[in-house]
Structures are given as structure tokens and as C-alpha cells.
Amino acid sequence: MAVLGASDDATSKSATFLTMWLDHGVAPVNADAAYAIVPDIAAPAMNSFVAPAIVANDAHASAVRSGSALGIVFWAAGSVAGYQSTLPCIVYTVTNGRTIDVYAADPTNGNGTYQLTVPSLVAGVRATTVTLPRNGGRTVHVTIAPPVLKRRATR
């Protein structure tokens, strides 16, 4: 019996390690299903796992939220949960207090740029639109912080 990951052999290998299907029945109508793959977690830790909440799942975007993280796959240009993209892309965000870390990629290996609009965490402050490089499919990371609001002195 072999143990996964127990070999000293550094030769690259590939193989199917999982086949999964969901039985939707004979003639499903308006049926849906959802699942989460959670790598590198032991069974006892699953007790504290925060299951993702589905934010969107349609022809335009699939999005899930878990705690302070939000993952979006834009299948087409559009908007979901206050985020807006001008082309299909993958977006992962983590909110840290007053900032939002945004990781975005255009998996089509395109060149040029695209725009991503990120909602503000501060009431009364407009969303931020950033121009991102398509970057040949590589992920781009930006941190968005709200502007410092100036206060007027009273007399």
C-alpha cells in the first residue's frame, strides 16, 4: 500500500485522484446543488469550518462568501455583491477591518487591461474602480483602503 506524499521521487506526475458526481434525478427542473472542497483540513477541524454562503450562481457569475472572504467567478462582464468587472475574471477578496485585499485574474491569458469596481466599506464613500492588467492570466493583488475623510474645524 502506498501513502500519498510519502515518496522521495521528485518526478512530476499526474493522475485522476477524484471522480465526483451529483445525482440530479431523472428530469430535474430548477434544481441546484452546491459543494465545497476543503483542502488540507483534518476531520476534527471540519467541526469549526464555516460553510460558504452562496451569493450568486447564474450564467453571469458564481460567488460564495465565507467569513470575511468572498470569491467570485465572473463568467461574463457584470456585477455581483457590489463588485463589477468589465470582462470575465476570477476575484477573491478578504476584508481586514477598513481595507479590502483583492486578488484578481483573467484566466483567458489575455493582454491589456480591465476594470474592477470594489464597493466601499465606509458608508457614504463611493466605490473604487481600479484598472488591472490582464497579466497573461497571472493573479494581481491590490489593497484598497478608504480615503481619509477631512474634517472641517468649527468656529
Image (cartoon, helix red, strand yellow):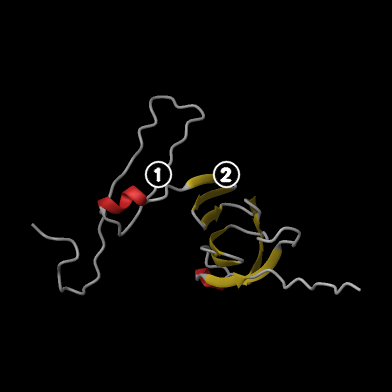
Say whether residue 121 is left or right of residue 21.
Answer: right
Between tags 2 and 1, which lies in front? 1
Q: Could you tell me residue 75's position as x and y percent?
A: 56, 52
Say whether residue 23 is left or right of residue 5.
Answer: right
Q: Secondary structure at mark 2?
A: loop
Residue found 35% across the figure and 54% down from its top = 38
**Vertical arrangement, residue 24 with respect to residue 15, above or below:** above
Mark 2, other Cα within 10 Å: few <14 / some 14–19 / many ≥20: few
Per the rendering, the mark at residue 155 is none
Per the rendering, the mark at residue 59 is 2
Type of the residue with mark 1 = Tyr
Q: Could you tell me residue 117's position as x and y percent?
A: 67, 61
* Pointer 2 or 1: first along the chain: 1
Type of the residue with mark 2 = Ala
Q: Could you tell me residue 147's position as x and y percent?
A: 72, 71
Per the rendering, the mark at residue 35 is 1
Residue found 49% across the figure and 27% down from its top = 29
Q: Could you tell me residue 13's position as x and y percent?
A: 24, 66
Identify which residue, 154 or 119, lies in the foreground: 154
Taking the view exactly as shown, the residue that stands out farthest to the left is: 1
